[in-house]
Amino acid sequence: MEMQVVHYAKPDDLEGDPTGGNEIFASVIGVLFTSNKDEATELSNAAQAALENFYESLEESALLEAAGVDWQVPLSNLMAVLDLENKWTYIGSFTTPPCTTRVYW
């Protein structure tokens, strides 16, 4: 399973067509999760708590969205337990239409 967190520039910072130049249009952090117990690493108590809190916040946000309330998913605790040494970076495109290019992954 993969979670993608997309970051855009503030609209006031963009001039003209942001995809037409050489500027980076957006940045994406893709977080890969595995459900295969043979591939999974042992989680610390802090990592397990961060994951449980994250999933609980997703459930809560779905209820808020259904009620028409603006919501935010807290990512700070989840990001704190990720292995940021094991990563790839590249410039590509979004994975869904219109597949906008100049995206920093």
Image (tube, rainbow, N blue to C red):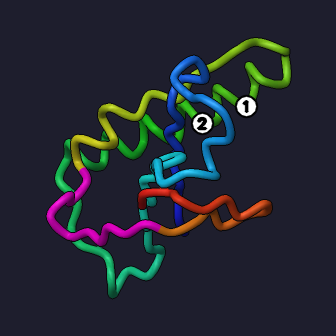
Q: Nearer the viewer, residue 40 or 24?
A: 24
Query: Dot 1, crowdedness within 10 Å: few (<14), some or many (≥20)?
Result: few
Choose top left, top right, bottom left or bottom right for residue 12: top right
Quadrant where the C terminus lies? bottom left
Real-space CA distance between mark 2 and mark 1, rounded to the nearest whole angstrom: 6 Å
User: Tag on residue 62?
Assistant: 1
The secondary structure type at the circle numbered 2 is: helix
Question: Residue 15 location in percent, x, y?
Answer: 60, 29
Q: Outermost residue toward the bottom?
A: 38
Q: Which residues are magenta?
A: 82-91
Asked if the stretch drawn in magenta spans residue 97, the answer is: no
Q: Is residue 96 left or right of residue 48?
A: right
Q: Is residue 75 above or below residue 13?
A: below
Residue 97's label in the rendered image is none
Tell me the residue that label 2 is attached to.
58
Q: Position of residue 34 (x, y in %)?
A: 44, 73
Up-down relation of residue 23 to residue 105 (above or below): above
Main secondary structure type of the part rendered in magenta: loop
Mark 1: which amino acid? Answer: Ala
**In the image, what residue occupies the spot 78% across and 60% down?**
98
Magenta span includes 85: yes
